[in-house]
Structures are given as structure tokens and as C-alpha cells.
Image (cartoon, helix red, strand yellow):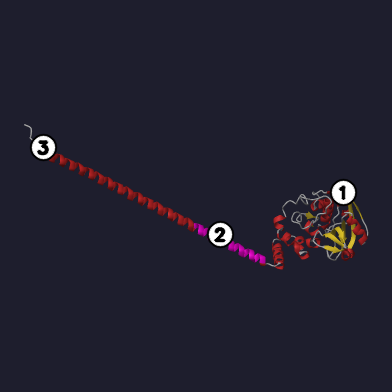
Amino acid sequence: MREHITPKERQRIRNRKRRQEVKRQLYMCGVLVILLIVLVVTYNSKAAEQKKAAADAAKTEQKGQKEQVSADAAKKMEESAIGTAADQETLKERIKRVREEARQAGYPEDITSLLKKNKETVDFVEHFAENKNNPAAKVVSDDLKKGEIPQLLQWDERWGHASYGTGFIASCGCGPTAMSMVISGLTGDASVTPVKVARYSEKKGYIDENNNTYWELMSEAAKHWGITSYGGDVSEDFVSKELKAGHPIICSVGPGDFTKKGHFIVLTKYKNGKVKVNDPFSQKNSDKTWKYSKIKDQIKSMWVYKMD
């Protein structure tokens, strides 16, 4: 027998079911809202942690950079202090220091004695140990012009450490250096270095047991390299005429402005009673002009050179 339900009762049942359905939907929505809140909170928490980690890393990097900057600044200050101290060293103090260092290092007397003869050699002496095993330069210059006499120094670091006799070109190579100036300048052959002339001089026996260069080198070396040489008097008229004609002159000079014993210099130009001197032992002497009348009496012999 089927139960009889009135329409009114049926409506109440339907309403109850709708309320239950709404409750379930509300419950599900609540669960979803809670899950969403949990997800948002979790995400924000992780984002905050990542942001904090990034900030900490940035602070660490900035700190490292500041420390590096500080270290670099300290290094620069130290280098500046060292540089200032070096700048404050007088030439006299430097020469004294270099002489003592050379003595302690056992430098040959030929080298250390250069400081007594010419203060300009201080760089050469100070760096002698660094350069002594380096091969000598193959040319006197990369831009040598034929007809122009180059200014060369016997204690140039490019060849001053090379041997000559039982000494060094720096200490006793004024003769080969003077000839190198004349030969390379007149011929335009940059390979005729002081070392090359020194080897020729040794081979031919133009250097004595005391490392003095014989006068014969001045004429024989010229002939060997195809240059005409001849002597002349020391009168100003003769010297001015030859120099104006483009004929350089090598002079052997005695005690005076250029040496205490003996030395070779090269005269290259003449104007208004003054001559340009290429002194192989002094840049200072080579940078100025000299009244010929002042050096005339110091000349012991001279050789004039020209190309045939």
C-alpha cells in the first residue's frame, strides 16, 4: 500500500532538500575559499622568503664590493705612498742607492764606475742585471735617414751591456759608437751598430789590453764600409767648411769638457762659430751646441768622412 503524501508535505520535502543542497554548496565554497587562502598565504610566504634571500644576497654582494673598493683604495694609497717616496728620492740619493745595490750584486767595476763618471748612466747601471743577458739591438734606429748622423750613446740599454775587449761598450766603447754614428748615418745602413763595429775592432786588433781603441779604427773601419776618410787641421775655417758640406768629423779629444783621459766625439754641424757635438758618453753634452773656440784646443786628432 503506497503512502499518501499531501502536496503540502511534498513541498516541504523539496524545500528541505534544497536547503541541504545549498548547505553542501556553501560548505564546498567554504572549503574552496579556505584552500585558496592557504595557497595565497603559502605563495606569499615563499615570495617573501625569496625576496628576503635576494635582499640578503644583494647586501652580501654590496658588502663584498665595498670591501673590494676599500681594498683597491688601500692598494692605490699604498702605491701612491710608494710613488711619492720614490719621487722624493734625490738624484744623489738614487745614485748612492744604485751604487750600493750594484756593489752587493757583484757588478763589474767597469759598470759601477760609470756612476762616478756620468750621473746620466744611473738608469743603465740600475737595470744592468735585467738587460745583461738580452741580445743586443740589430739596428741603431727604425727610422734612420741616409745622410743624417744619429745620436748614439755607448751606455744605451740596447747595446751597452755587450762586451768590448775585457770591458763593456758602455764603459769603453766610445770609439765603436762614434764610428757607428758616422757609418750608419752616411750609408743609411741601420745594421751598423756599436756592437758590429766593436766586433770588427776586436777582430782587427784595434783595441789594446786596457780597452783603449787605437786611432787606426777611425780610418780602417770607414774604408771597410766604403767611406772615404781624411785628416785635416783643427782650424775653424776647415771644420766649418767640411761640416757645411755634410762631412761629419770624429775627433779624438784629451782632458777637458768631455773626458779626464781620452775620448772620441763626433762633430756634425757648424753655424755661427758653434758646432753640434754628438758625444757618445753624454746626452747632456749632445743636447747643446759648443763654441768651436772652446773645444779646439782639446782636439788631438780628427778624421773627416764622406761618401764617394
Of 289 and 126, the residue lying toward us = 289
Separation (CA) of disc 3 from disc 1: 145 Å
Separation (CA) of disc 3 from disc 2: 95 Å
- SS label for mark 3: helix
Q: Is residue 252 visible?
A: yes
Q: Residue at x 77, y 65 (%)?
A: 116
Determine which quarter of the picture holds residue 10.
Answer: top left
Q: Is residue 234 visible?
A: no
- SS label for mark 1: helix
- Which comes before the other along the chain, label 2 or label 1? 2
- Which comes before the other along the chain, label 3 or label 1? 3
Separation (CA) of disc 2 from disc 1: 60 Å
Type of amino acid at the residue the image marks with label 2: Asp
Q: Which residues are magenta?
A: 64-87
Residue annotated with mark 3:
7
Magenta stretch prevailing secondary structure = helix
Q: Nearer the viewer, mark 2 or mark 1?
A: 2
- Which comes before the other along the chain, label 3 or label 2? 3
Residue annotated with mark 1:
224
Residue annotated with mark 2:
72
